[in-house]
Image (cartoon, helix red, strand yellow):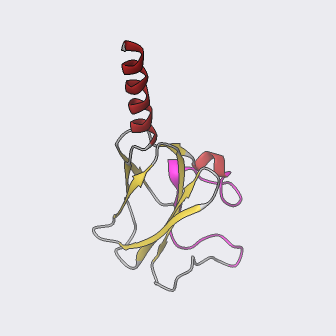
Amino acid sequence: MYRLIAILFGLICFLNSSYSQYKLDIEISEIRSNKGYIMLQLFDGKEKVLSQEQNPVKDNSCLFSFTSLTPVKYAVRYYHDENMNGKMETNLVGKPTEGYGFSNNVIGKFGPPPFEKWLFEINDDNKKIVLKPTY
């Protein structure tokens, strides 16, 4: 009888942790102007886009919230579309002229940083990350 109760308790704990729903809040701060919006993509650990959203800039920051996430690795990339034309502007040599960034605030040397450096884990019920764009 005790063995059956222990097995059922273990199964309930396993199912509860496997199907827990986590929340991720992302704040992008220190945005240089309140013009336009932030275009953000949320990726899973295999570089698959899970969500693409845009939110307006207010008080030089922007907030995103994702719910019903599982405790795995995720990554984020974003840009500040100041002129609201739906694409990131670049100069003649291809350097972005609008703000952009990646999760963990990683910066690439010649192009985007390796995807593995963007990855972060969600292991709390509510996780908040703060990102700062590069201009």
The picture places residue 18, in percent across and down from the top left corner, at: 46, 40
State the residue at coordinates (66%, 59%). Answer: 112
- Majority secondary structure of magenta residues: loop
Total count of labels? 0
Residue 105 in magenta stretch = yes
In magenta, the rendered stretch is 92-114
Visible in this render: residue 22?
yes
Q: Is residue 41 above or below residue 15?
A: below
The picture places residue 95, in percent across and down from the top left corner, at: 65, 70
> Most extreme residue toward the left, as rendered?
59
State the residue at coordinates (40%, 26%). Answer: 8
> Most extreme residue toward the top, as rendered?
2
Which is more toward the observer, 5 or 59?
Answer: 5
> Most extreme residue toward the bottom, as rendered?
85
- Give the image quarter of residue 63: bottom left
The picture places residue 113, in percent across and down from the top left corner, at: 65, 53
Left or right position of 20 against 74: left
Visible in this render: residue 27?
no
The picture places residue 26, in percent across and down from the top left corner, at: 39, 56
Q: Is residue 78 above or below residue 88?
A: above
Where does the N terminus fall, quadrant-wise?
top left
Residue 107 in magenta stretch = yes
